[in-house]
Image (tube, coloured by chain):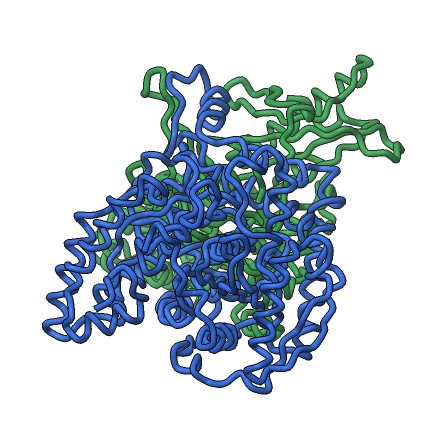
Amino acid sequence: MMGISSFSGWEVVIGLEVHAQLATKAKIFSGASTAYGAEPNTQACLVDLGYPGVLPVLNEEVVRMATLFGLAVNATVARRSVFARKNYFYPDLPKGYQISQYELPIVEHGELFITDGDGNERRIGITRAHLEEDAGKSIHEGLGASSGIDLNRAGTPLLEIVSEPDLRSAKEAVAYLRKIHTIVRYLGISDGNMQEGSFRCDANVSVRRLGQKVLGTRAELKNLNSFRFIEKAINFEIERQIELIKDGGEVVQETRLYDSDKDETRSMRSKEEANDYRYFPDPDLLPVEISEEYIEAIRVTLPELPDAKQQRFVNDYDLKSDAAAILTTSRALADYFEAVVGATDARAQVAANWVLGELSGALNRENKGIGDSRIAATDLAGLVNRIHDHTISGKIAKQVFEAMWEGEGTADEVIEAKGLEQITDSSAIETIVDRVIAANPGPVEEYKAGKDKLMGFFVGQVMKETQGQANPEQVNQILKAKLND
Amino acid sequence: MTELHSQTLTELAIGLESGDFTSVELTQALLDRVAEHNDKLNAFVTITADEALATAARADAARETGSGGVLNGLPIIHKDIFCTRGIRTTCGSKMLENFVSPYDATVVEKLSAAGAVVLGKSNMDEFAMGSSTETSYFGPVRNPWNLDCTPGGSSGGSSAAVAARIAPAATGTDTGGSIRQPASLTGTVGIKPTYGRVSRYGMIAFASSLDQAGVITRSAEDAARLLGVMAGFDARDSTSIDQPVPDYTLSIGDSIKGLRVGIVREHFDAGLDQQTGARVREAIAVLESLGATTVEVSLPNLDLSVPTYYVVAPAECSSNLSRFDGVRFGHRAEDPEDLLDLYCRSRGEGFGDEVKRRIMTGTYVLSAGYYDAYYLKAQQVRRLIADDFKKAFANVDVIAGPTTPSPAFKLGDKVDDPITMYLNDIYTIGANLAGLPAMSVPCGLVDDLPVGLHLVGAHFTEEILLRFAHQYQQQTDFHTACPEAFK
């Protein structure tokens, strides 16, 4: 992949359209369930199937969720928004039109902040976010010459979040996307599951020579279903466009599909083939009218958002900004961390190290989220406490952690069962120190001659004799006292 | 005893209640009328004799135990635009020739719950697009007053059946006059309530912002009785309005003395047949004799209603009919080569000319570059027309005028001239654009063909319209006139 420096002399302009599936129980215009993974067409009622005579009825929960999002990104929540019909024919679109918001979306003029490559905070504008229904899925595999249609997804509520073309690199695009992803999950309005398609992204990418005023012609990239692919696809596309222009060609406005196997984008349809969607207000639905009181009542329910939480973690727990950033990527992780902190006398930094170190490592190893942790926050706090009160050393603690992860009990139970408690009895340590000194006359001579570095060797020997259970501070003290005699 | 088929719904209700006859006897008598006359009229797409007799038997049993609803055992017909579970619903189209709905429309559900017996589904213009029933895939309906003439449309099967004394009442739908125009042309009573008064759920959509269900009956009293059952809020229709439904039969006996009748000067200009105008003036004189006063009102933008309607309605229909794509239900082309071929041939074969004309018009007016000039402009004019009515109703209780410019025309006369056909709705369309309740009441004959008095009210004043119509019918007998061949 080409490095960012290869783009020098060029400016990249990226805008993103995110489709976040809203985590409602029922669909946006019908009572059918939105649960993922059911047998095809078992979760599509007559409204979803577009039967003659049926009518849509708005699930008001989506209005609450969109409002919550609007408030979270400091946007204007429209007192009046209107559902329109986007008309086109496709087999997975039962009515021949998609109900979406067009001229009057529910959310406009929002913003969020990302950190750019130089560590500076950058404001990214959010043009709008609007409510719409999802289409079904066409199935082409395993049906011979025929195609199938699964309409379970038809009518699933989506919030389409459109950014301003403020992003200047693939990395920024990913940072923005991660921020949106974090926010919708914090708000509890989307599960953000990219594999199941409940968080999808299209990217509008164009390039122009530095200093050029006019925007370049953009290509719309589709099928970007992981953060990694998004970065790769955008970088591929930037490179393609620059090479094209350098060779005297012109970028055409078109939709391009990203192929993750070949790591390339290829043309799907050009602007000439684009549909005229013939939008008009849906006469079956009334305008969505909400009051100032409604908006304020929802504002009260806004949770602490990632940026604020991160700042609080830095201030209250004395964490480094990047550690605080990672701990606040999800509400569940942040809550877990705070639960550990709340149940331990140790410093928050120690708790953070354990959550971000051993625990995250174990979770990643098994591809699990914090919600699936095999060690409860209070139990991890129990482990941290035993380090804090010197019952065990940090090194032994890792051993205890592994045992806890394997379900062998709490920290205390594991320490007890395995006899891992630290040796803090000075006379016991002294006996061992004496033995080590007696067994190593050579190094002792060298040490006394000024080779201080050998202290580590002696500590290591003592720890080895005690199978790591001696209190390292005490070992140090006693060794120093005896060797310096 | 008057023959059963000659009685109004209200008279039949009394007869059933007093045990003069059973619902099974009544239903059978009307089914005999269907068998005798339908070949001439072509008013039915589907006759549901077995189901009707079974429902009638249940109604009779319910009456024994005193558990019947307010329409218990009374036969009606549904326009074939209302979805009926287990009985095909064609909407007058080849597209839905074999479509059997898995559910009942709210209107059907409510009338059935009240005990109504459904004799069948009535013929109509394809997808309710037409003013003569000539666009029906199942052939035109004939007017009982003159079999060479149209019974109007799109609810022409309903109007013909009621006029021919085959059924005492029928449901209809009205998007630009589709209840009132056929009522006018067949000497029956037709009411289109306020937009949102009756649920549209299960009514196959033509133009969603204009469509409204109503009834065609022999008398205003019968209309009041049925409307009370059909009306009301429905959570399944977001445009239905949550407002209590009055018992319309209670207030129809009240006097109209002192109420003000608005007369629109433009209604009586050159476009109106002179004799039709004369009948309407006579009817207004009757209202005056009952103590109502007349006031001249102005609807300055009314001449824009037909062009406005023919932008808005096709626009909505072009989108509403997109679901008929041959994929899930309805007509599907044989052996499609690919997806585009499936779409083009299924729709090309399934839809008739008038439907195609309107889909194309609607697609055009919504297209990029034309939207502002047509659709948006039409919506602006629509607001102007609604405002005109609003101003008028500040001074009057109803607006009275002709329902149609002339009596029934000959079948075939206008079928090749859509513009002239469209102008037949010139007096009725305004009420749809403004969402107002309106009705047509028989007010006499012109050359042995009936014509109707058109009454329009302010939003949710169905009570007043029905009272006017009922009081008028206490003084006149035009609504009891029966075409000779169907006595």
Inspect this view and state whether residue A462 appears. Answer: no
Asked if residue B209 lies left or right of residue B484, the reply is right
Where does residue B19 sit, x and y in percent of width and height? Answer: 14, 72
Q: Residue at x 59, y 20 (%)?
A: A264
The foreground one among B80 and B420 is: B420
- Quadrant assignment, res B281: bottom right
Mark yes or no: residue B303 visible.
Answer: yes
Foreground residue among A118 and B242: B242
Is B476 placed above or below B359 here? Answer: below
Residue B123, located in which quarter of the rendered image?
top left
In-image side of B318 versus B5 (left or right): right
**Chain A, hue in figure:** green
A262, A474: nearer the viewer:
A262
Image quadrant for the N terminus of chain A?
top right
Q: Position of residue B214 (x, y in %)?
A: 44, 60
* Left or right of B276, for residue B18: left
Residue B319 image position (x, y, % from top left): 55, 41
View extreme (top): residue = A247
Q: Is residue A207 left or right of residue B415?
A: right
Q: Position of residue B477 (x, y in %)?
A: 43, 69
Which residue shows up at 44% across the image and 60% down it?
B188
Q: Is residue A382 above or below residue A241?
A: below
Tally of numbered discs: 0
Chain appearing in blue on the rendered image: B
- Position of residue A208 relative to residue A100, above or below, is above
Give the residue at x 73% y 66%.
Answer: B265
Q: Residue at x 57, y 37 (%)?
A: B413
